[in-house]
Amino acid sequence: MSAISIRKLVKVYGALRAVDGIDLEVAEGDFVGFLGPNGAGKTTTIHSITGLCNFQGGSMRVFGLDVVSDYRKTRPLIGLCPQEFNFDPFLSIHGLLVYQAGYFGIPKSVAAKKADELLGYFRLSEKRNVDFRKLSGGMKKRLLLCRALVHDPKILILDEPTAGADVELKYQIWNFLEDLNKKGKTIFLTTHYMEEAERLSRKIVIIHKGRILHHGDKEALVRDQSLEKKYLELTREKADD
């Protein structure tokens, strides 16, 4: 069964076609690396799936449910880990996880236990009663993951989750994502790090200027001879004295 099904998706900002009629299938339980340069349409596609922006053409389904007409059913199926730190500054980090779970109808007692579990795994338990502004950048990255997972979604979407992370945190996140995927979680990852995509992903999707250039198994991309032996040579002219 398809976890995510996209047909002819179009998203326009004025004269810019940020997403230009893409088709994409993500199977349940898969781990997909979504690659492309800045401005390629990665975040716009994610925001269309999660309902953070409207789109002008095409359709999107999550486990067979339309993300527009069945939005009340599709939203709980997705957990989004964005790039930006968009936390409520008036709640403790434990409180904001419980509050987030409340959006999905999870009882406070159940949400509190899940929040404790996630904070413990990511070594944030000692900070449970402080607000996010008192956390380091790496701690905030971990808190984004906790918030995305507190309602136990079937799909986890991550928008460059290790950007700016130190080596220790990067490997902790990688190990955690691999374990989640082994347990059946569908993961959709955007990243600029080829090492990250190569280690984690089973499928690779490359988008450029709003269009899909490649969609297939990671191994097939690695074997693609058309990508070999391409390089850019730069020369510098001697400056005038």
Image (cartoon, rainbow, N blue to C red):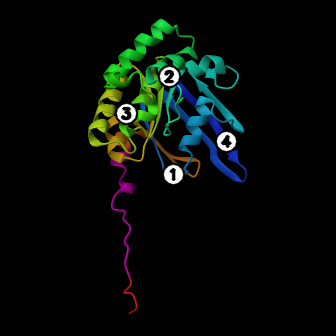
Q: Residues within 10 Å of mark 3 (few under 14, many from 20)?
A: some
Please give the residue where the numbered disc 3 appears in the rendered image: 139
Q: Nearer the viewer, mark 1 or mark 4?
A: 1
Residue 139 picture quarter: top left
Per the image, label 3 sits on a secondary structure element best described as: helix
Provide the residue span drawn in magenta: 221-236
Residue drawn at (67%, 41%) of the image: 10
- Going from N to C along the chain, the mark reached first, 4 or 3, is 4
Q: Separation of disc 3 and disc 1 at Cα?
A: 25 Å
Task: Using the numbered discs, state the Cα–Cα distance from disc 1 to disc 2 in whole angstroms.
Answer: 30 Å
Query: What's under tag 4, amino acid-wise?
Result: Val
Q: Which mark is residue 117?
A: none
What residue appears at the point 34 percent right and 21 percent down from the top-left corner?
125
Residue nearest the observer in this picture, 183 or 129: 129
Do the numbered discs 1 and 4 sit on residues whose CB atoms are within 8 Å?
A: no
Q: Is residue 176 above or below residue 116?
A: below
The image shows residue 169 at horizontal and vertical percentages of: 30, 36
User: Where residue 72 sits in the image (x, y, percent)?
Assistant: 65, 18
Q: CA distance from mark 4 to mark 2?
A: 34 Å
Q: Which amino acid type is marked by label 3?
A: Met
Residue type indicated by callout 1: Asn
Residue named by callout 2: 96
Counting from the top left corner in percent of width and height, residue 61 is at 61, 26
Q: Is residue 150 magenta?
A: no
Q: Residue at x 41, y 34 (%)?
A: 134
